[in-house]
Image (spheres, rainbow, N blue to C red):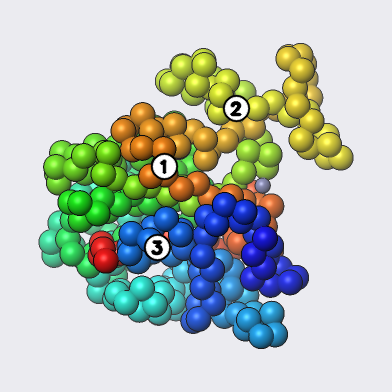
Amino acid sequence: MIKLSAMQLTISDENKVFNIHTDGIPYLSFDMLDKLGVPHLYTTRYVNYDKATCVGEKGLRVCVMRDDDESEAAPHVLEVRSRLARQLRSSIEMEYITDQKHTNFVNVVREGELGPIWPNNKPLHRQYVDGMVTDIPGALLTVFGADCPSVYIADPVKKCIGLVHAGWKGTLGKIPAVAIAQMLLNYGCDPADMYAAIGPGICRVCYEMGDEVYDSFASEWSKEDADRIFSRYIVDADNPAAKDDGEAARGWKYHLDLREANKMTLMRAGIPEDHIAVSNVCTMCNSDTFYSYRARRMENEQCAMMVNRFR
Ligand SMILES: [Zn+2]
């Protein structure tokens, strides 16, 4: 177990999935991607954290929310992301973000497109886009999410990266595979050389879904796949992990495992299983530490960042 705060954050990390950084704005990084030397991060609620006293200030804001006053929020979040970029030895002038509308569209970042643009004057081709890939040296990709995992993709041979936002709709649309396909087409990657990490997000036990979501996966993937990535739990606050015995009765709800679903997509796209790291951190189970849409709605989000730089 790793403890960032005796009170607030306890991450089960028996497999050493993450490294925790508390200098500057605190963040998590994947040990596997750290070993490749790819600068990347995943933020928390914390603005700062003092390891000696186990006290930190919360309320980090990385993006403009719908109810925010844009004229106040936009400069603030750009300054926060500037600091995060500098912690990765990059710059906000190298950043690329998109609109994120739960699609499976992935942009290929072009020269001349880097730099802060949030929230206004976003070009049309960045709207309705939830992922991006780049081979531009030093480019910084940023994705936001409060329960939806980000999927980080890196190819140390062709020196290119991808980052996608994979909520249930993006996961249904296999957005990690779309990003990988863009990297194969544009950069000549071989999936056998690629690495991927599925970031923090909502866990299966927390992620109750309507029957229609199961039906969507059963029809667009297959029934076998849907049965593998969905569990059915009885709706009982005192016993949330009770497993279905096969009875199709009212009171049972489907729960989706986004980690398993995205891992299947990455492996089917050809990434070796031992090149895939999977988060063991749930944003909703740990909603004191992470923003969780399901737990507390629209407060703010975490950001995932990755720089196209290899050791
Ligand atoms: Zn959970």
Q: Position of residue 239 (x, y in %)?
A: 83, 36
In front of the other: 22 or 273: 273
Secondary structure under the numbered disc 2 in the rendered image: strand
Residue receiving disc 1: 274
Asked whether the viewer can see residue 62, the reply is yes
Q: Are marks 2 and 1 in contact (CB under 8 Å)?
A: no
User: Residue 220 appears at what percent x and percent y?
Assistant: 42, 20
Q: Which residue is mark 2?
A: 230
Question: Marks 2 and 3, Cα distance to the nearest angstrom?
Answer: 31 Å
Camera-side residue of 52 and 14: 14
> Is residue 123 shown left or right of residue 20?
left
Q: Residues within 10 Å of mark 2 (few under 14, many from 20)?
A: many
Give the quarter of the figure containing the N terminus: bottom right
**Residue receiving disc 3:** 34
Query: Can you tell which quarter of the image residue 60 is in?
Result: bottom right
Type of the residue with mark 2: Phe
Q: Quadrant of residue 229?
A: top right
Query: Is residue 149 something that shows in the picture?
Result: no
Image location (x, y in percent) of residue 22: 54, 77
Q: Earlier in the sequence, mark 2 or mark 3?
A: 3
Q: Amino acid at mark 1?
A: Asp
Q: Residue at x 52, y 40 (%)?
A: 259
Q: Earlier in the sequence, mark 2 or mark 1?
A: 2
Mark 3 to mark 1 CA distance (whole Å): 15 Å
Q: Place residue 13 in its image quadrant.
A: bottom right
Query: Callout 3: 10 Å neighbours few (<14), some, many (20+)?
Result: some
Which type of secondary structure does the marked residue at label 3 adopt?
helix
Chain-order first, disc 3 or disc 1 = 3
